[in-house]
Image (cartoon, coloured by chain):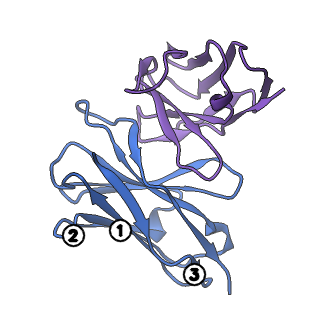
């Protein structure tokens, strides 16, 4: 059974770069068909999709964050990563990685999620 | 961007009640609509995809309907484990979530 696990610092200083990694176990990130996602949830708020990476390495980012976000893939470690530049207090949130289903062409719902990791931006 | 609007934002109900949550899209998302349940401190869990298809392992008291711009999630008989926040999500064009509906104990 595929599982996802986020890891990274829980505290980042303003203007610095937030870096998180999602480790995939129980399946290969290179098997194709799935989009690998980052989503965040501000405290007490709803869910915001950040972006995805496909097994081929292609990416797409939420336009509201596009200039600040980079998502990359490390197939040798079965991991994908998120970098968010120039963070502010507004980036304080729980960050989730997730996988979309593989039911055919186009996009799909997210069937597997990591447990989430809280990241605070503070001096 | 496709905007998703859920109603109500909060719903008070009792065990055994039939509960309905509505989700409206700012433009047609055809049938590409999912519902998630989230409990405090936990990641969301997929309940329904393609508007009405129950995810494996999800109890049959959950059902979804709709297409285009209007969708509903129904819980036929609310159970203690169902008190949670529910989100809709469109995936016709990328992904957008609704703001959530909290189902609380009356």
Q: Which of B69 and B102 is in front in this view?
A: B102
Which residue lies at the image location 65% right of the left edge and 21% below the top edge?
B22
Q: Nearer the viewer, residue B24 or B35?
A: B35
Sequence-first disc among 2 and 3: 3
Give the number of the mark in front: 2 or 3. Answer: 2
Question: Residue A108 in the image: x percent, y percent?
Answer: 35, 35
Q: Mark 3 points at which residue?
A: A12
The colour with which the image depicts chain B is purple
Which residue lies at the image location 62% right of the left edge and 83% below the top edge?
A14
Q: Mark 2 points at which residue?
A: A77
Provide the chain ID for the residue under circle 2.
A
Q: Mark 1 points at which residue?
A: A81
Chain rendered blue: A
| Distance Cα–Cα, label 2 vs label 3 | 24 Å
**Circle 1 crowding by C-alpha within 10 Å: few under 14, some 14–19, many from 20:** many
Mark 2 vs mark 3: tell me if same chain: yes
Sequence-first disc among 3 and 1: 3
Classify A107 as above or below B49.
Answer: below
Question: SS at mark 3?
Answer: strand
Q: How many marks?
A: 3
Which residue lies at the image location 16% right of the left edge and 69% below the top edge?
A76
Query: Which of the image's four quarters has the C terminus of chain A?
Result: bottom right
Query: Which of the image's four quarters has the N terminus of chain A?
Result: top left
Which residue lies at the image location 36% right of the left edge and 56% below the top edge?
A4
Question: Residue B94 in the image: x percent, y percent?
Answer: 41, 41
Question: Residue A48 in the image: x percent, y percent?
Answer: 55, 51
């Amino acid at each position: 059974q595929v599982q996802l696990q986020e890891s990274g610092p829980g505290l980042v200083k303003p203007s610095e770069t937030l870096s998180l990694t999602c480790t995939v176990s129980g399946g290969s990130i290179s098997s194709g068909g799935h989009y690998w996602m980052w989503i965040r949830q501000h405290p007490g708020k709803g869910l915001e999709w950040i972006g995805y990476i496909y097994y081929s390495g292609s990416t797409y980012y939420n336009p509201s964050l596009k200039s600040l976000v980079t998502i990359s893939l490390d197939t040798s470690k079965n991991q994908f990563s998120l970098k968010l530049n120039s963070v502010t207090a507004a980036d304080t949130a729980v960050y989730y990685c997730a996988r979309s289903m593989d039911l055919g062409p186009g996009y799909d719902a997210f069937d597997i999620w990591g447990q989430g990791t809280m990241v605070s931006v503070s001096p | 961007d496709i905007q998703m609007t859920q109603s109500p934002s909060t719903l008070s109900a009792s065990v055994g009640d039939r509960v309905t949550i509505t989700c409206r899209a700012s433009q047609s998302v055809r049938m590409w609509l999912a519902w998630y349940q989230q409990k405090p401190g936990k990641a969301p869990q997929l309940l329904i995809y393609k508007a009405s298809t129950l995810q494996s392992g999800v109890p049959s008291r959950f059902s979804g309907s709709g297409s285009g711009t209007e969708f509903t999630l129904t819980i036929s008989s609310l159970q203690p484990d169902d008190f949670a926040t529910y989100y809709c999500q469109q995936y016709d064009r990328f992904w957008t979530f609704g703001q959530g509906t909290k189902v609380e104990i009356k």
